[in-house]
Image (cartoon, rainbow, N blue to C red):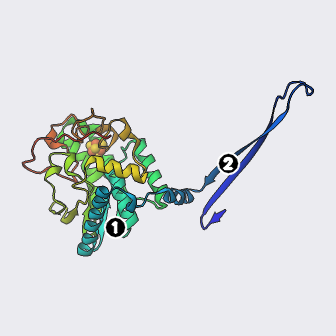
Amino acid sequence: MLLGQSWVGIRIGYKVTEAGAGRSVASASMKTHVHISVSLFCSPTSRSTIVGLMNVPTSDLPKALRERVNASIDQLRNAVGEYKNLCYANSLGSESVVLTDLIWESLPEIEIFTIDTGRLYPETYDLIERIEQRYGRALKMYYPDAADLEDWVGKHGINGFRDGLDQRHGCCGIRKVAPFRRAIQGFGAWVTGIRRGQSASRALAAPVEWDGEYGIHKISPLLDWSEKEIWDYIRKKRLPYNSLHDSGFPSIGCAPCTRAVPPGDDARSGRWWWERTDSRECGLHPRRKGSPLPVTVTPKA
Ligand code: SF4
């Protein structure tokens, strides 16, 4: 069946068996069974349509979660009214799949992009593909400047970011911050998926802030969501998510700089774990002066 660029096929097979086969015809009481199998196969775009049909509408979510969703969408809508063109820097964590769903379902005029540092986990690339299949559209990708990266790796080595904070910031600067600066060019504000519960530094964030580092407003519509609400939304809406979350990764970044953490530990403690806790940000969300000690988050149910 053709649906524009999409196609859906149904394969029906059958097999006939006879109970008592192998015995003498005279002695067996023969019964004929017909086994019918039906399987569905389809193009990626049709798959997203089918997933969409399985989707749970926001109106069917529990009241408290629905109110969270509506508050976040209202905040984004107000930001679009105020700052006109917005972009969302998708980090591909659990908050990101929620925010991607809110944006592509309700405010598709907000551009979503992600930065491929070249050091992501294979599971993260797999998530990108599943997101694209679900929504039937491609994520805008930004990459580090090849010449700058070749120069940096030539001087410091492939994993030179482990040699000190300056080297780590140098690697994040080329692989993340520089592509990010290019990505936000021309936008009135950028959207982030940070939550207060993620770290002591993020606990001090405000829903709308002037980001002096990049000269642009920063909108954080998930700031007050709990980790449990994030996962309730993912499960109820059957959203694709990074399979590493099921292996103890509350926060997922580059493979050599992220590891699993014990349940109940600070959500960011698996990032740059060899550094002091007060330096563990990537440059997109610099640490605030006077941040209290790390907060403990509720483990994923
Ligand atoms: Fe480099 Fe690690 Fe930063 Fe990724 S997280 S850009 S590998 S220092």
Residue situated in front as seen by the camera: 287 or 173: 287
- Residue under the point 49% across and 61% down: 136
Q: Residue furthest left?
A: 290
Secondary structure beneath label 1: loop
Q: Residue at x 15, y 37 (%)?
A: 276
Q: Quadrant of residue 185?
A: bottom left
Nearer to us in this view, 71 or 164? 71
Residue 146 vertical position relative to residue 168 in the rendered view, above or below = below
What quarter of the picture does the C terminus occupy?
top left
Determine which of the numbered discs, if any, sits on residue 38 in the image.
2
User: Is any part of residue 70 visible from this angle?
Assistant: yes
The image shows residue 69 at horizontal and vertical percentages of 31, 60
Query: Is residue 84 or residue 175 the one in the foreground?
Result: 84
In the picture provided, is 113 more to the left or to the right than 287?
Answer: right
Q: Quadrant of residue 105?
A: bottom left
Give the Cα distance between marks 1 and 2. 40 Å
Observer-nearest of 3 and 282: 3
221 over 34 or under it: above or below: below
Secondary structure at badge 2 equals strand
Please determine whether, in this image, residue 44 is positioned above or below residue 78: above
Amino acid tagged 1: Ile
**Rendering quarter of residue 284:** bottom left
Residue 123 horizontal/vertical position (percent) = 42, 42
Measuring from the top left, give residue 40's x and y in whole percent: 63, 51
Residue that numbered label 1 is attached to? 110
Q: Is residue 32 left or right of residue 216?
A: right
Residue 145 seen: no
Crowding near pointer 1: few (<14 within 10 Å), some, many (20+)? many
Residue 159 place in picture, x, y as percent = 30, 37
Q: Amino acid at mark 2?
A: Val
Q: Dividing the image into four equal quarters, which quarter contains ligand 1? A: top left
